[in-house]
Image: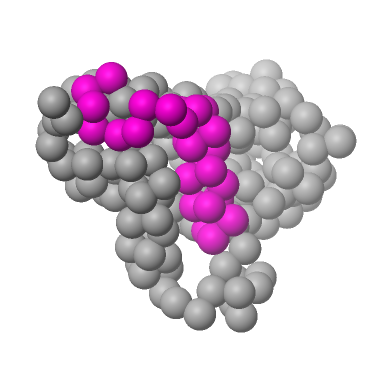
Amino acid sequence: MDVRESLLKATVKVFAEAGARGATTRRIAQEAGVNEVTLFRHFKSKDDLLECALRTLAELAADRKLPDIPADPVAELTEWARDHHRMLHKYRALIRKTMGEFEENPSLCACTCSATIKMTSDLADYLKTLQLRGLAHPGFNTHAAAAMLMGALFADAISRDAMPDRFPYSMKESVDLAMPLFFQAIGLTTRKKS
């Protein structure tokens, strides 16, 4: 791992633990195993470093794509949902911090949320393709359906540890339980209608 990558990774970790104020350049440099002079050789300011780290992480998350042409929609959507759910859960502390600091640091929240916005749009496009191919009901709003699924995954992944009584099933089971309901709601079929 190169120095820049180490700094970005350290920034995500420290920000998730301490928020923007607590994520000092000294603390980030220590976490990355470098000194502050090295940090400032790579990034012009702390704000630049924070935004770059969050943008890089968001781009990685948004890189999880559904196929342009559905082959097995049930399997494709289920695996995609599992991946997204795991990613949200892994970075839940970071997401909570950026959302909690929205009023003070809206640009950091925008960086973090950009992945979800892109993924929701990609999901809506995939659902539209299912409609056009006769594999799902033609009448539903694909953006609303995508927002519904993304919201369910988000709520589970972000709040599971804060409200354990709300989730009397495992994390893995949550996706397995939610997806059949989603498939039913959109009228997903496994064959093309004539």
Residue drawn 46% across and 31% down? 140
Can residue 138 be found in the magenta stretch? yes
Which of the pair 73/16 is nearer the observer? Answer: 73
Can residue 161 be found in the magenta stretch? no
Is 26 displayed left or right of 173 in the figure?
A: right
| Image quadrant in which you'd find residue 54 | top right
Image quadrant occupied by the C terminus: top left
How many marks do you count on the picture?
A: 0
Residue 170 in the image: state x and y as whole percent: 42, 74
Residue drawn 78% across and 48% down? 100
| Above or below, comparing residue 16 to residue 160 in the picture | above
Residue 75 in the image: state x and y as whole percent: 20, 47
Please indicate, yes or no, whether residue 132 appears anywhere in the rendered image.
Answer: yes
| Above or below, comparing residue 162 to residue 103 in the picture | below
Please indicate, yes or no, whether residue 126 appears anywhere in the rendered image.
Answer: no
Is 113 displayed left or right of 84 in the figure?
A: right
Extreme residue in the front direction: 194
Is 58 displayed left or right of 39 in the figure?
A: left
Image quadrant occupied by the N terminus: top left
Extreme residue in the right direction: 104
Determine the main secondary structure of the stretch shown in magenta.
helix
Is 31 displayed left or right of 134 in the figure?
A: right
Residue 166 in the image: state x and y as whole percent: 61, 74
Residue drawn 48% across and 45% down? 149
Residue drawn 40% across and 31% down? 123
The colour style of the image is one colour
Q: Which residues are magenta?
A: 132-157
Which of the pair 139/63 is nearer the observer? Answer: 139
Residue 155 in the image: state x and y as whole percent: 59, 56
